[in-house]
Image: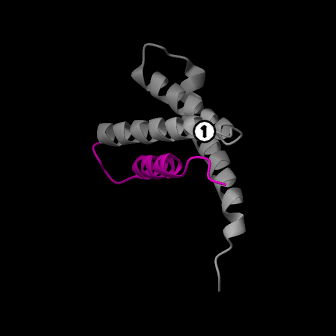
Amino acid sequence: MKPAKSLFPVFLWIVRIAVVFAVYVRFIGLIRSFETDEWSFYIAAAFGLFAVLLLLGGFSRKHNLTIISGLIIAVLSVYQMIQLGFGIGQSMAFYGLMTSIGLLFVSLGNKK
């Protein structure tokens, strides 16, 4: 059986939408609290901003926005994993997936 290469662009869009949804579910409470004296607020806001920029980067012909957004998401996720101490749990799984998705878009850009 041959792989369905024509579904690859659809897959990338599903991943982009899933990233925005996952970041929304994970960080909406922190963003709504708007406690600017907390460092976690800025991390959550950066995740939200770059997840939306990753989605918007898919509409661009150039790869820059997608690559930068993917890189920032990956770096923020690694930072959060370091803060958690690399323990096993739901948070580590979330940040591990966000790291891999970020690096996916760094390596692929807006491949069609």
Q: For the point 46% across and 28% down, which residue is it?
A: 43
Q: Which residues are magenta?
A: 85-112
Residue 42 vertical position relative to residue 58 in the rendered view, above or below: above
Judge from the rendering whether residue 26 lies leftward or rightward of residue 93; answer left or right: right
Q: Does 36 appear in magenta?
A: no
Residue 75 on image: x %, y %: 40, 38
**Residue 66 image-quadrant placement:** top right
Residue 52 on image: x %, y %: 63, 34
Q: Does 86 appear in magenta?
A: yes
**Residue 82 image-quadrant placement:** top left
Q: Amino acid at mark 1?
A: Leu
Residue 42 on image: x %, y %: 47, 22
Judge from the rendering whether residue 28 lies leftward or rightward of residue 42; answer left or right: right
User: Magenta region's main secondary structure?
Assistant: helix
Give the labeled residue for mark 1.
Answer: 54
Q: For the point 55% across and 17% down, which residue is it?
A: 34
